[in-house]
Every structure is written in C-alpha cells, then in structure tokens.
Image (tube, rainbow, N blue to C red):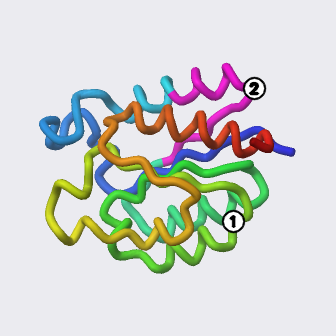
C-alpha cells in the first residue's frame, strides 16, 4: 500500500497569502505543504501537493492518484461549485477523499454553498484556515491506516 497523500488545489490558490488575505490569510501554499508534510511524517505518510488553475490538469492528478496515493485532500476552490468532471474523477478514486476549504464557504455568497465534490467526499472541512489542511491530512492518515 502506498503511503502518499495527494493534496490537490484548484484555481487561484497559487496566490494564497497575496489574494484577499482578509479571507484566506497570509500563509502561502508552501506553508500549507510544509505543515501537511510535518503532520503526515508523524504518522508515517508523505504528501504530494499540487495546484492548478486548469480543471483538466486537476482531473489528471486525480487519475494519477488512483495508482499513486492512498488518499486525497482536495480544495477545488471555485471548481467546488461547478465541476461535475472533478466529481466524476473522484468517483473513480477508491481511497478516502477529504474536501477542504480555507474560508467558511457557508458564510459567503450563496453560490458558494453548493459543492459537487461533497457528494464524493468522506469529510468536509471549511473555515479552519490552512489548519484545515492539517486536520484533513490527519484524518486521511487515519482512514488509510484502516481507522
């Protein structure tokens, strides 16, 4: 069994720490990767963080994860509310999936309240800042270890 966890990030998250810091905070995607790698290593796992502004590229990563990852943490960003294609790709992945959002999407615009990804996710975290990623990695480690 692989012990790699894929952490997939959607559009505009490459600007984390710069774009709307009042909503998303000042930490960067590199900070997310470092913190998640530390949490995973404590449990004997590793992470592979990926970000793309392109839906098809995210789908390609989900397809790759079918062979290379025990679980997926995904922040699909704006694709959360629009992408049936990402949902379909996640349905083809057999391991656990945790959906993660930095902000509390339910306190924001109404169009952000619906998530296609949640239809596949084993858990959803929203509003915990980048700490949500760490919580998601902890849960994926537990699920991948059989817990």
Q: Residue at x 78, y 57 (%)?
A: 67
Please state the total of marks drawn on the protein image.
Answer: 2
Structural crowding at the residue carrying mark 1, measured as other residues with C-alpha within 10 Å and reported as few (<14), some (14–19) or many (≥20): many
Q: Quadrant of residue 146?
A: top right
Secondary structure state at the residue bearing disc 2: loop
Residue 126: image location, x then y, percent:
35, 48
Looking at the rendered image, the quarter that the C terminus falls into is: top right
- The disc placed on residue 4 is none
Above or below: residue 17 compared with residue 85: above
Is 53 within the magenta? Answer: no
Looking at the rendered image, the quarter that the N terminus falls into is: top right
- The disc placed on residue 44 is 2
Decide if residue 105 is on the left or right side of residue 46.
left
Q: Which residues are magenta?
A: 36-50
Decide if residue 68 is on the left or right side of residue 53.
right
Extreme residue toward the right, this view: 1
Q: Quadrant of residue 19?
A: top left
Secondary structure state at the residue bearing disc 1: loop
Q: Residue at x 68, y 32 (%)?
A: 46
Is 48 within the magenta? Answer: yes
Between 80 and 49, the one lying in front of the other is 80
C-beta proximity under 8 Å, tags 1 and 2 = no
Judging by the rendered image, the residue that carries numbered circle 1 is 93
Q: Residue at x 41, y 75 (%)?
A: 83
Q: Earlier in the sequence, mark 1 or mark 2?
A: 2
Structural crowding at the residue carrying mark 2, measured as other residues with C-alpha within 10 Å and reported as few (<14), some (14–19) or many (≥20): few
Between 116 and 61, the one lying in front of the other is 116
Query: What is the distance, in whole Å, between disc 1 and disc 2 at their CAs?
Result: 22 Å
Above or below: residue 63 compared with residue 46: below
Residue 2: image location, x then y, percent:
81, 43
């Amino acid at each position: 069994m692989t012990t790699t966890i894929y952490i997939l990030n959607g559009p505009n998250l490459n600007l984390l720490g710069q774009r709307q810091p009042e909503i998303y905070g000042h930490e960067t995607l590199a900070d997310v990767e470092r913190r998640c790698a530390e949490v995973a290593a404590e449990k004997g796992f590793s992470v592979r963080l990926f970000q793309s502004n392109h839906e098809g590229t995210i789908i390609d990563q989900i397809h790759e994860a079918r062979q290379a990852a025990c679980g997926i943490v995904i922040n699909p960003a704006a694709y959360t509310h629009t992408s049936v294609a990402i949902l379909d790709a996640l349905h083809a992945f057999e391991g656990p999936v945790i959906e993660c959002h930095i902000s509390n999407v339910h306190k924001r615009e109404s169009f952000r309240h619906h998530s296609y990804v949640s239809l596949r996710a084993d858990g959803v975290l929203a509003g915990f800042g980048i700490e949500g990623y760490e919580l998601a990695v902890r849960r994926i480690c537990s699920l991948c270890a059989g817990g």
